[in-house]
Image (cartoon, grey):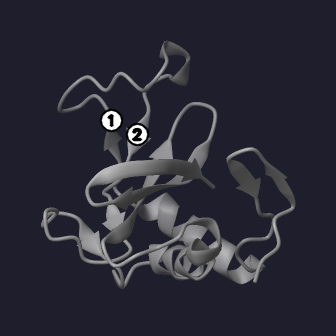
Amino acid sequence: MLIPTYEGHGFAVWDDFLSKEDHRLVWNYIQSETLEFVHQKKWVKAFRLTDGEPLWGPPFLSDPYTPDIKSVVYPTKKGIDLFIFELKNLAPHIFTLKVQDYLGIGIMKTVHKVLLFIMHTRNGTLNGVGNF
């Protein structure tokens, strides 16, 4: 089990979440993923003007979720699988996962950073968001 480098109220930080090789492979995948402007289809209020023109990629799910038939479910046969695999191993230590839970995984790129983010959902209700 990975031990958090730092823990605070409601959050934890893990360093070296991926091995150096897996990190390189995931980074190469992110560079080749097709991203689109977040406001392309509608205005998303979660972003600041200082974020520039944020981009995001398609969502991926850790496990099948019946209401969502559009998102790709792990394993995707893409480089993101390395991240999802490690996240699923770590998830029971972060969340109390139950049968009706799933993790949504996505890629986002802003002027300031590139990040992977997760959304923990239970019974269709968003319980938390984190980024890597």
Q: Relative to 112, is 18 above or below?
A: below
Question: Residue 54, image x and y in percent?
Answer: 44, 33
Q: Which residue is drawn at 67% across and 72% down?
A: 23
Q: Which of 95 and 37 is in front in this view?
A: 95
Where in the figure is residue 10, as x and y percent of width and height?
68, 47
Label 2, on which residue? 55
The structure residue drawn at horizontal position 65% and vertical position 80%, both measured from the top left corner, is 22
Q: In which quarter of the image is the N terminus?
A: bottom right
Circle 1 packing at 10 Å, graded few (<14), some (14-19), many (20+), is some
Find disc 1 in the rendering and name its residue.
37
Q: Looking at this view, is 2 or 73 the one in front? A: 2
Mark 2 vs mark 1, CA separation in Å: 4 Å
At label 2, the amino acid type is Leu
User: Which element is circle 2 on?
Assistant: strand
Q: In this view, does 42 lie to the left or right of 48?
A: left
**Residue 12, image quadrant:** bottom right
At horizontal 70% and vertical 50% (from top left) the residue drawn is: 11
Badge 2 vs badge 1, beta-carbon distance below 8 Å: yes
Left or right: 7 in relation to 89: right
